[in-house]
Amino acid sequence: MVLSVVGTMLLATGSLLTGPAAGLEPGPPPAPPSIDRPAPAAEPAPVLRNGSFDDGSSSWIRSYRRADTAATVVDTGDDNRLEVLAGATEGAVAQDLPTPARAGHRYTLSIRAESPTGLPVLVEVAIHGLSATGSIGETASRLVMVEGHEVPITATLEPTVDHPTIRAEVYVHTVDRAVWLDDAELLVDRDPGVWNYGYQQPRVRFPDGVDPTRLEPGQRYRAEIAVGTTTDQPWRCCVGTGSVRLGTEDEDGVGGSGIGSPLFVPPDQAGSNWLSPTRIAFDRSESRIGGTFTTVVRAPDEPGPFSQRFRLVAEGVIWLPGPVIEVDGTVVDPPPPPDPPPPPPDPPPPPDPPPPPADPPAPASAGVDDAPPEATDGQPPSDPDRLRAASSEPQPLTEFAPQAGGPCESGPTIIGLVPGLCPPVPEADPPCPEVTVTFDPPVLLSYVGRDMSEPAPVDLPCSDHEIHLLSTDERHRSGYQADQTGEHWFLEGLDATGAVIYTSPAGPDLAEDLSSSSTMVERASLAGVVALRARHVGDTTSANSVGVEAVLVPLP
């Protein structure tokens, strides 16, 4: 059965009215195939009422902006679902459970979510430890963008002190849209199971700047697919039953059909992360942020558009619930061969033959002395022997300076270099890449527990960068919450020990008339930084959310 919620969230405080006590006891999920993980503890006593709505009743009540929130159990034809409409404002539903939260134990709230319209809806599942007065002491939550498909969402609370009561709560951050929730379950000291894996809409990019709409036949290029999880359940890496991989899907939406991908590049070739024609392994994974798949793919040989569909699979267990992942492109006709070079010009005609030698002069008349001939017109007399001797003297080496526009214009001057020969020029170092950093969670709030992200690993071959902070809020629009303030944040750089060695200036507050803004906050050295963390400025007068992303542009 499914719970449907429309609205947006602000944190609810205070105690709740208790709904009907009757409800169905949540049965254990179906056992998956054998997987290498610890055996679950004994089934705990049921504490969550109305995990589903088979009997047509609901123990979930409105917990935020109740006057503008309607909750009704409806029959969808397949089963009963609780549809909650919050109009144009925010809303939430919850249960207060008479189950204490003990320090040192783990409490996991697990719910399946679906958007019936297929439009994206931002959903948050939260579990709170309440004080004796009903105020929230400790809390854990998880934000997921639900886009038409059913995905599991889990939030796990590990209290450090005892709380007399637990509250399970569901918030919706997107107004005027519906979300269905089903199979709610509260587990104590128990893993929700591999069947509760789930993933969000992936981000596909081509890190080498390749234009996928203009590929040459058979061209190889890198594709990067980043996928975020929807649960606290860590992904397994990298071998054996339950390992999460990217699997091919056929045109009918059937995974595991054995149809190999035309984009396949054998795993023994450079840059390939393919395990087989139907599987790609992920290159890195963290328990709360999913994984990234980076591999070389090969464009088809035939010109025209192509699309390869993938889904995530827990190997040997289940095809994970989540959206289809598509790698699209277009192969264009190869360029025509260049025109052949023109034929060489005809050789020049041979020079005219030299004129025949002049007749020798007549011998001198008798009685004339054998004196050297007189100079004429002030020139010295000709001396063939002296000219021959002068022409055979060695010539000194001269300095050759490259001429402007010549082949060695930028090269060094070389003594005695024959014109036309150039010294080798050393190759320039390759430029450092621009780095885009995404964070988990992607949205920060100002209150403690949601004011910072997990550390995001970064690889920075260059130390000096321009620091750009991108702030987003998809809920900015004309006439809606014009008083939103405090939507600004900053970066912390961590070294290999986890110590903070860099702190950036904070970006500006996101203006009310903008849904996104990018600001270059400074130029700085990030030497020694191996991870970055996003932190909300923490304005206690406002709990507005802000989406965070950073871009690091290397300086020359």
Image: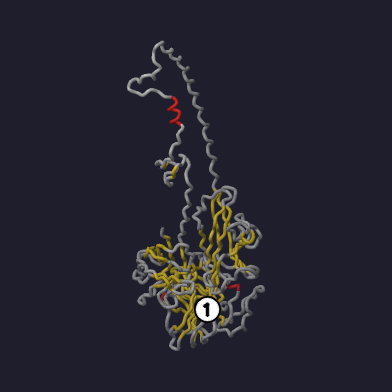
Q: Who is closer to the viewer here, 303 or 16?
A: 303
Question: Which x, y percent locates residue 356?
Answer: 48, 17
Q: Quadrant of residue 407?
A: top left
Image quadrant containing the N terminus: bottom right
Question: Which x, y percent locates residue 193?
Answer: 60, 75
Question: Which x, y percent locates residue 490?
Answer: 40, 70
Q: Quickly name the residue at label 1.
A: 156
Left or right of residue 375: residue 211:
right
Q: Is residue 153 visible?
A: yes
Number of numbered discs present? 1
Determine whether 119 is above or below 37 in the image. Answer: above
Left or right of residue 51: residue 39:
right
Q: Residues within 10 Å of mark 1 (few under 14, many from 20)?
A: many
Image quadrant containing the C terminus: bottom left
* Colouring mode (rainbow / by chain / secondary structure / one colour): secondary structure
Q: Who is closer to the viewer here, 146 or 238?
A: 238
Determine whether 47 is above or below 78 in the image. Answer: below
Q: Quadrant of residue 38?
A: bottom right
Q: Who is closer to the viewer here, 318 or 400?
A: 400
Determine whether 45 is above or below 5 in the image. Answer: below
Q: Is residue 5 visible?
A: no
Looking at this rendering, what residue extends furthest in the top direction?
366
Question: Which x, y percent locates residue 251?
Answer: 60, 57
Q: Residue, x 53% and y 43% (percent of image)?
A: 335
**Mark 1: secondary structure:** strand
Residue type of the residue flagged with mark 1: Thr
Q: Who is closer to the viewer here, 526 or 185?
A: 526
Looking at this rendering, what residue extends furthest in the left direction?
378
